[in-house]
Image: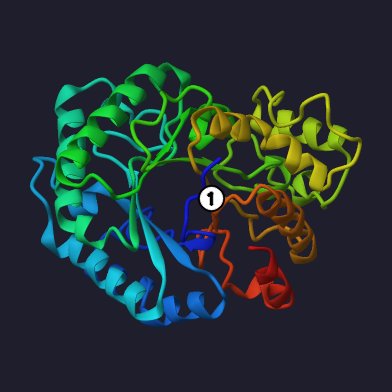
Amino acid sequence: MRKFEGYEKGVNLGGWLSQCGEGNYHKEHYDTFIIEKDIAQIKSWGLDHIRVPVDAEVIQEESGEMKEDGLAYIDTCIGWCRKYGLRMILDLHKAHGYVFDDENNCQFFYQERLQDIFVSLWSELAKRYGKDRDIVALELLNEVTSSEFTETWNRMAARAIRAIREVDREVKIVVGGIFNDSIYGLTLLDPPADENIVFTFHCYSPLAFTHQGAFWVSRMPKDPEKWRLSYPGTVADYRRRSEEFFGHDFDSEYPDTLPEMMGPEYFDNLMQPALQVAEKYNVPLYCGEYGVIDLADPRDALKWYQDMNSALRKYDIPRAAWSHHSMNFGLADPWLDGVREELLKYL
């Protein structure tokens, strides 16, 4: 399995140019949410890259015309990365007609006009940032959801890759699968188009712990005593909580081969399908998001990061934690003040 060189450990800049919050898609927010000292801090943490989620509406009109005022923030961030010796993954977090956390906003997968705009966007971004390929990689789309989009997503990813390759043959292109960039989703991706493709997955498992108390989960109880969960715990308890709160089939998250208690073996087992895909295609892997909600006990979060990191390091998988600050998962936020120094060892 080849490695995604130069992107060993990083952090997301969630909430800056994506998921800005209602009423925050404006200059004042962009100018203040992430500033140069944040990039300096990330470097001081010993990290080597950032993942920058960007919503299409920030950098492209729905007509397809590019928005220079939005692109300027990416330009500035690349300048900061060069100054502090970091690399960047430019991640299209939301496309025109597609929002990963809104099941009613998936027109992208059905409308040719929106698909053409998507391809045009990547062509333009390749023209603009191909020159920065030494420190910038391009991630096509964050967290495709339903399995019904599998065929369309493979087709659209191929179109976007062809458009980028017409401009630049060497820039790294990051591609994830269905079910919100799940490990299982990697098994349904078409083979990589060339040697400069990277397959990405996200890992917030077990959701019952990492998303305990998440207000955006409709089935999550309001009473903290009903959702509070420590780490580690028994696999059986985690599975029961996951089915109760999230209502999904969690066979892939809790396979029968697991030991009774949570621990490093859990994450080792979880990543096996991704490793099999990587070996099959000799394609590099990248874990683009992982983390723990700020409602968890910080000491338990530390243990989770330690176990998760043990598997990522064992298989030499580059990664980026979610997220630098805010977004309910902030590594720089006060909730981690007592454990941050230790936690940074496990990114």
Q: Nearer the viewer, residue 291 or 307?
A: 307
Callout 1: helix, strand or loop?
A: strand
Mark 1 surroundings: few (<14), some (14-19) or many (≥20) residues within 10 A: many
**Image spot of residue 80 (x, y percent):** 33, 76
Instruction: Identify the image quadrant of residue 136.
Output: bottom left
Quarter of the C terminus within the rendering: bottom right
Q: Is residue 60 visible?
A: no
Compared with 13, 233 (above or below) is: above
Compared with 286, 337 (above or below) is: below
Compared with 115, 268 (above or below) is: below
Compared with 94, 137 (above or below) is: below
**Image spot of residue 67 (x, y percent):** 12, 56
**Image spot of residue 96 (x, y percent):** 24, 38
Q: Is residue 248 visible?
A: yes
Q: How many marks?
A: 1
Q: Residue at x 69, y 26 (%)?
A: 250
Q: Nearer the viewer, residue 195 or 225?
A: 195
Q: Residue at x 78, y 50 (%)?
A: 228
Q: Nearer the viewer, residue 266 or 281?
A: 281
* Disc 1 residue type (three-letter): Glu
**Image spot of residue 32 (x, y percent):** 34, 76
Q: Nearer the viewer, residue 230 or 45?
A: 45
Quarter of the N terminus within the rendering: top right
Residue of label 1: 289
